[in-house]
Image (spheres, grey):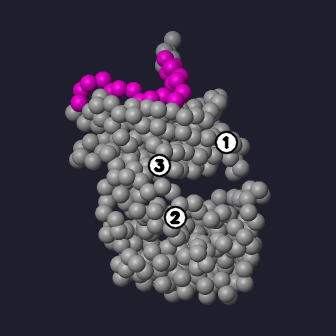
């Protein structure tokens, strides 16, 4: 697991897109039953609503119209976009409009269907079409999911996402037939089960930070420095820390529960990293919580310090011994290699 965090940090450094770019999403199994029920709206009315809102939103993005974008984007998404860009030392809203220019026209996609939830205040519409994600490679059939939320009596865009259907031919066929049942079976097509909460507005970062989590079989709710809020569920993911990290004292709190998606718990890892900003520098881990399959995952509140020695370890030319991050759980000693007789 220790090796995992170093590899993961190096793999993700600089790899996270600014809000507005659409990372690939992976469909999971159906959501657990205790969540708000899924609703099936009138499909043609839903399609008309979604396309009107999306096209208005897309036009405001293309024109760099901040006022128009705000009027058709949820409050929670506005703050999340702003926090992400600010926390990576970007310029908001300029960098958002630069990165969001690639939003696709719906003319390139076929409508597959829509579902609602949260008492009719959320909606997710799914479209299918060929799309090339990234600058290289061939175009593949993708599902394009648009999430809307009713806010202040108006429907607004919250986010869009894609996921590749090329390895899911049965799902692709059912979507092409506008089979609403397949939308219910895969939570990648689901609307929010509750209206998103608007997070706190974060300050500019002193140090750019990311949190890396690998939590098979577990769901984690987390808050860093009282501002950066994160949720992970049976997944491996990295998030930018809103407001970054600070030299000196920092705090993290989290609640760990069993995931509804999987009962298998091969191990768990949480790592907080200060990310490099100078050419040639490397990430440094400043906090970790690492368990193997036999470990007991415990929730907690922790205060940890980012010392000058930890920051100096970001320079690969620094020959001093690398200081240890704060360990929420003591690391198990490594087994000595077995010698051949």
The secondary structure type at the circle numbered 1 is: strand
Q: Is residue 230 above or below residue 132?
A: above
Q: Residues within 10 Å of mark 2 (few under 14, many from 20)?
A: some
Q: Is residue 101 left or right of residue 290?
A: left
**Image location (x, y in percent) of residue 25:** 55, 62
Residue 141 visible to an observer of this rendering: no
Which label number is shown at residue 227? Answer: 3
What's the magenta bit mostly, secondary-structure-wise?
A: loop
Determine which quarter of the picture holds residue 103. bottom left
Query: Of the residues under marks 3 and 2, which one precedes in the sequence?
Result: 2
**Image location (x, y in percent) of residue 52:** 55, 86
Q: CA distance from mark 3 to mark 2?
A: 14 Å
Q: CA distance from mark 1 to mark 2?
A: 25 Å
Residue ID at (47%, 32%): 303
Q: Which residue is mark 1?
A: 257
> Pointer 3 and pointer 1: residues touching (CB < 8 Å)?
no
Total tally of numbered discs in the picture: 3
Q: Which residues are magenta?
A: 318-336
Determine which quarter of the picture holds residue 21. bottom left
Query: Of the residues under marks 3 and 1, which one precedes in the sequence?
Result: 3
The secondary structure type at the circle numbered 2 is: helix
Is 110 magenta? The answer is: no
Most extreme residue toward the top, as rendered? 341
Q: Which residue is mark 2?
A: 76
Is 329 magenta? The answer is: yes
Most extreme residue toward the right, as rendered? 33
């Amino acid at each position: 697991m220790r090796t995992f965090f170093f590899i993961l940090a190096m793999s993700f450094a600089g790899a996270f897109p600014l809000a507005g770019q659409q990372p690939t999403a992976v469909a999971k199994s159906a959501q657990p039953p205790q969540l708000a029920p899924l609703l099936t709206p009138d499909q043609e009315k839903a399609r008309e609503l979604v396309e009107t809102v999306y096209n208005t939103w897309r036009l405001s993005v293309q024109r760099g119209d901040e006022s128009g974008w705000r009027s058709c984007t949820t409050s929670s998404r506005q703050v999340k976009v702003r926090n992400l860009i600010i926390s990576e030392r970007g310029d908001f809203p300029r960098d958002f409009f630069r990165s969001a220019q690639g939003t696709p026209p719906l003319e390139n996609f076929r409508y597959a269907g829509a579902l609602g939830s949260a008492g009719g205040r959320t909606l997710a519409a799914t479209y299918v079409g060929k799309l090339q994600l990234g600058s290289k490679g061939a175009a593949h059939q993708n599902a394009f999911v648009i999430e809307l939320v009713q806010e202040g009596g108006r429907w607004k865009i919250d986010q869009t996402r894609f996921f590749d259907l090329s390895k899911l031919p049965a799902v692709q066929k059912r979507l092409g037939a506008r089979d609403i049942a397949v939308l219910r079976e895969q939570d990648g097509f689901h609307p929010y089960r509750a209206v998103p909460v608007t997070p706190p507005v974060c300050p500019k970062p002193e140090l750019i930070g990311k949190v890396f989590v690998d939590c098979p079989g577990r769901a984690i709710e987390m808050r860093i420095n009282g501002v950066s809020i994160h949720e992970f569920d049976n997944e491996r993911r990295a998030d930018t820390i809103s407001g970054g990290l600070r030299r000196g004292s920092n705090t993290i709190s989290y609640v760990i529960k069993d995931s509804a998606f999987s009962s298998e718990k091969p191990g768990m890892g949480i790592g907080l990293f200060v990310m490099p900003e100078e050419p040639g520098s490397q990430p440094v881990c400043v906090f970790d919580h690492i368990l193997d399959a036999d470990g007991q995952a415990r929730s907690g509140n922790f205060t940890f310090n980012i010392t000058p020695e930890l920051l100096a370890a970001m320079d690969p030319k620094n020959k001093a011994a690398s200081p240890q991050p704060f360990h929420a759980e003591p690391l198990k000693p490594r087994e000595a290699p077995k010698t051949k007789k």
